[in-house]
Image (cartoon, helix red, strand yellow):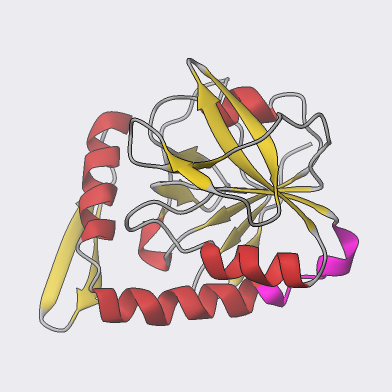
Amino acid sequence: MKYCVMLQKGQKWFINTNMDKNNLRKKYKNLRDALSSDLKKIYDQKILENFSGLDLKLYQNFFIYYNFKNEADTKAIIKMLLKLEKNVYLPKTEKDKMFFIKYSGQALIKNNFGIYEPTGDYTEDIPDICVIPLLATDYSGNRIGYGGGYYDKFLRDKKCLKAGLLYSFQITDNLPINKLDIPMDILITENKVIRIKQNG
């Protein structure tokens, strides 16, 4: 099956959904990277507004990624959460594991992949909500990330709300999954908030 998305005026991309994960990663990364900077700013503002529309008083501990390159922006969300006096935690990777460090505005250091990470001690606090980066997802909340499995490992024993931030063209009908993949509970795009109904 193919479908078409418009990224900027006069530009169309066609996506074949019958692909393996590696090819899907390449396709959706190219799609996201082709998004114009002007349109990205508009979409990011709308994502911020939709995120702000959640019932944030239900949550205190926000584990959230610090966006890299053309990922959906989290910097404005982090700033808003700190202003609301929420606890914000940013990820740091070490070998094949991911840890979180409480963030209150301290210096960030660029790792070997060019991603900014916090300084400080790893937290043992439990997330109320984890905001997760992704390349693609489907309407069942199945996610394709970057292939490292960091979030799937981290979330395996967590009972928090799992939220994916993305642009609407990153959602498709069905994605290939395996038993170790952790699905999202909620998807937040520039157009709407999608709450996933999990079986069982």
Residue closest to the far top: 95
Determine the image quadrant of residue 11. bottom left
What segment is highlighted magenta in the picture? 52-59
Depicted 146 relative to depicted 17: above or below: above
Looking at the image, residue 52 sits to the left or right of residue 137; the answer is: right
Residue closest to the far left: 10
Depicted 45 relative to depicted 168: above or below: below
Q: Position of residue 166 (x, y in %)?
A: 46, 60
Looking at the image, residue 81 sits to the left or right of residue 56; the answer is: left
Quadrant in which the C terminus is drawn: top right
Q: Nearer the viewer, residue 198 or 127?
A: 127
Instruction: Answer yes or no: is residue 6 visible.
Output: yes
Q: Nearer the viewer, residue 38 or 189?
A: 38
The residue drawn where x is 85% and y is 55% is 60
Determine the image quadrant of residue 113. top left
The residue drawn where x is 43% and y is 44% is 174
Looking at the image, residue 17 sits to the left or right of residue 42; the answer is: left
Q: Position of residue 20 (x, y in %)?
A: 28, 30
Asked if residue 90 is among those painted magenta in the image, a careful observer would answer no
Depicted 171 relative to depicted 12: above or below: above
Q: Nearer the viewer, residue 131 or 184?
A: 131
Instruction: Answer yes or no: is residue 191 visible.
Output: no
Q: Position of residue 121 (x, y in %)?
A: 71, 30
The residue drawn where x is 53% and y is 53% is 139
Depicted 194 relative to depicted 180: above or below: below
The residue drawn where x is 61% and y is 32% is 182
Residue closest to the far front: 107
Q: Position of residue 111 (x, y in %)?
A: 40, 34
